[in-house]
Amino acid sequence: MRLRRLETRLPAQRAVEGDGFVVHRPFPVPGTEQVDPFLLLDQMGPVDHGPGEAVGTPVHPHRGFETVTYLLEGELQHRDSLGNEGTLGPGDTQWMTAGRGVLHEEGPTSGFLARGGRLHGLQLWVNLPASAKMIPPAYQDITADAVAVSHPSPGATVRVVAGEAFDLVGPGSTHTPITYTHVTLEPGAQVASAFDPNHTVLVFPLLGVVAVGDEVLATAELGVLGPGDAVELSVPADAASPSEILVLSGRPIGEPIARHGPFVMNTREELVQAFADVRSPEFGS
Ligand code: MN
């Protein structure tokens, strides 16, 4: 077994989306366009909204990749041009394959907007290979009770949404090999898992800190791990609170990307075509 060590640190940067939706984004940032096969990672909150304060993102298009939204706290709703509609609560995932094109809107539910409360979630963009960029759009609604859960060691909870990690297999279906795991570790707890040596592996502490070997990642500091076939994570025994950690892995796609705004294609011509197509009433239907 060869443990992966921390190779690169990407501290999240503040960005504003939609109607004033504040996110913390480790990538893309200048100098790091993607962490192949992942195109974007946003942490939404944790933020406490008063009644009437929560905001969302109005109708917008996507083409050429997938958006994966996972919620830890709060309530979001989603509606798209294919007629898919869903509500996300804590532990739920919405895995949307934009493929050749979809229009959607994302925001707080009317109940959450009225009541206010704490919102904490993630949105990940997963690239599609050239062979799948123009597939028909699709939608997976993965509820919290469908996620694979275990307690592999004292003080550790592991929830696998997709792929095989921590001896679990998640329910999500992916177009290239990807694993998506939410790990909760109490102070002093430790977990380990094998990961495919060909995968990129990312570790992102959403709350609290996490150690990869003897290197500690701060809250909202993304760690890109180096080569190896296993990952060991721990939380220092003197940490003030439990840590919530996102662990992602995926096989790099290794293709050129041409991206602008909501479209991620392989060539500039395909990007220009996407901007032309989105004006057609056919887009997203
Ligand atoms: Mn979107």
Image: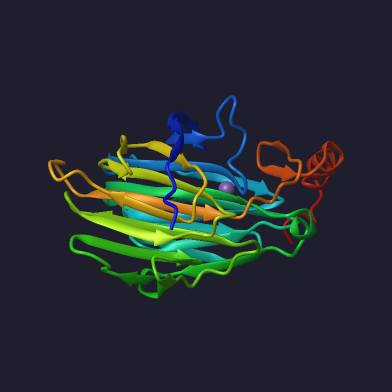
Q: What residue is rendered at 48% in x and 31% in y?
A: 16
Which residue occupies the foreground of this view, 47 or 166? 166
Which residue occupies the foreground of this view, 230 or 224? 230
Which residue occupies the foreground of this view, 9 or 52? 9
Q: Position of residue 79 (x, y in %)?
A: 55, 59
Q: What residue is rendered at 71% in x and 44% in y?
A: 264
Image quadrant of residue 24? top left
Task: Quadrant for the C terminus, please.
Answer: bottom right
Q: What residue is rendered at 14% in x and 45% in y?
A: 237
Is residue 217 rendered to the left or right of residue 5? left
| Display coloring | rainbow
Query: Is 165 rendered above or below residue 250?
Result: below
Q: Is residue 181 visible?
A: yes
Q: Is residue 22 visible?
A: no
Task: Quadrant for the N terminus, please.
Answer: bottom left
Q: Position of residue 168 (x, y in %)?
A: 41, 72
Is residue 68 rendered to the left or right of residue 133? left
Image quadrant of residue 283? bottom right
Q: Position of residue 6 (x, y in %)?
A: 42, 39
Is residue 175 rendered to the left or right of residue 88? right
Total marks drawn? 0
Which residue occupies the foreground of this view, 121 or 85? 121
Q: Position of residue 10 (x, y in %)?
A: 46, 32
Question: Residue pushed farthest top?
Answer: 30
